[in-house]
């Protein structure tokens, strides 16, 4: 792609802004009325702004499937940030599943001091290390964004309003970075279509997740979302003919076990607490 990762975020998030605004107008959703609601837009918008750019950097330096696998660590981080922001205490079992998930990172990064040098290519290992760094940076940012969005829902903030506000902040922050670093370029027609498709897909994902959480429990949805690891390996094979090595496949399996176990153990008492409050 001929444009920088920051410009990728600016262009794709612009599509999210337009589509979210159309939905807001179509459904006649009023803007938030309390100052507290606007304040909670800041942490989600800022975290999404940087995690989107970090994701683009990550897939630039390492395989898509490995990046997606590492990003699933965000489910583990959700427990920690839920404790801080939502006052939901973590459990001992969460630390066990977190340890399993960390093992996944070792298999995904394949450090040379454990697995040996890969074909003597130092440049490839260096790029992979940079990709892992950006992916590990994205994981906690995703967790922060998810927890804050959940907090926004408790404040009666409509999901389309949240999507619009987060995309607007992400666009402005990355636009400033593009201008400051002089990384602005005119994208080709193919790149422009790709970025438009990415923004449209991002919008559809947000709407789909909202519908999923409104129809099904958070546990079931979170378990289903871990299947994206398998889908990432599948798409990588279809489009790039890349067969995952055994370490990546094992790492993906480990993180799925960790995420499923963590969400199942953590979500059950939360549901009971919510039910008690409703009663």
Image (cartoon, grey):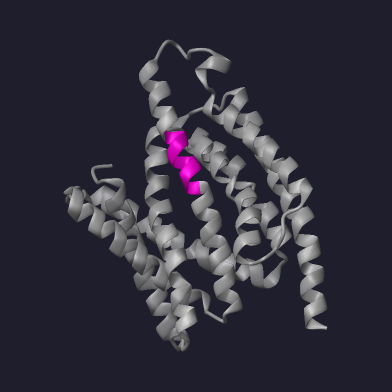
In screen coordinates, is 133 left or right of 249?
Answer: left
Which quadrant, please, contains the C terminus?
Answer: bottom right
Which residue is found at the position 67% from the left and 59% from the top?
221
154 is higher (above) or lower (below) than 69: below
In screen coordinates, is 269 left or right of 161?
Answer: right
Which quadrant, please, contains the N terminus?
Answer: top left
The stretch drawn in magenta includes residue 5: no
159 is higher (above) or lower (below) than 8: below
| Magenta span of residues | 131-138
**Magenta span dominant secondary structure:** helix
Q: Farthest residue toward the top?
A: 120
The spot of residue 230 in percent (x, y) is 61, 40
Which residue is found at the position 61% from the left and 61% from the top?
84
The spot of residue 128 in percent (x, y) is 43, 28
In screen coordinates, is 6 left or right of 256?
Answer: left
| Viewer-nearest residue: 219 or 279 | 279
Which residue is found at the position 82% from the left and 77% from the top?
276
Q: Can residue 131 be seen in this view?
A: yes
């Amino acid at each position: 792609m001929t444009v920088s990762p920051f410009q990728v975020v600016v262009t794709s998030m612009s599509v999210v802004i337009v589509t979210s605004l159309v939905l807001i107008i179509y459904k006649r959703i009023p803007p938030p009325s309390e100052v507290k609601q606007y304040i909670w837009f800041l942490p989600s918008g800022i975290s999404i702004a940087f995690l989107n750019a970090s994701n683009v950097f990550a897939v630039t330096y390492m395989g898509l499937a490995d990046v997606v696998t590492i990003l699933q660590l965000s489910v583990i981080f959700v427990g920690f940030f839920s404790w801080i922001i939502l006052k939901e205490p973590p459990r001992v079992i969460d630390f066990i599943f977190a340890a399993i998930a960390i093992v996944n990172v070792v298999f995904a990064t394949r450090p040379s001091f454990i697995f040996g040098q890969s074909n003597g290519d130092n440049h490839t290992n260096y790029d992979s290390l940079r990709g892992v760094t950006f992916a590990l940076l994205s994981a906690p940012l995703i967790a922060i964004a998810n927890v804050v969005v959940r907090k926004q829902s408790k404040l009666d903030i409509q999901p389309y309003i949240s999507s619009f506000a987060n995309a607007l902040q992400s666009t402005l922050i990355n636009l400033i970075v593009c201008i400051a670093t002089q990384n602005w370029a005119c994208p080709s027609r193919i790149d422009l279509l790709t970025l438009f498709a990415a923004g449209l897909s991002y919008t559809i994902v947000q709407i789909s997740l909202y519908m999923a959480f409104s129809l099904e429990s958070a546990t079931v949805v979170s378990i289903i979302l871990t299947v994206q690891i398998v889908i990432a390996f599948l798409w990588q094979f279809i489009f790039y003919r890349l067969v995952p090595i055994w370490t990546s496949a094992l790492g993906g399996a480990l993180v799925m076990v960790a995420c499923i176990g963590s969400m199942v153990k953590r979500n059950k008492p939360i549901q009971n607490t919510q039910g008690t409050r409703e009663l």
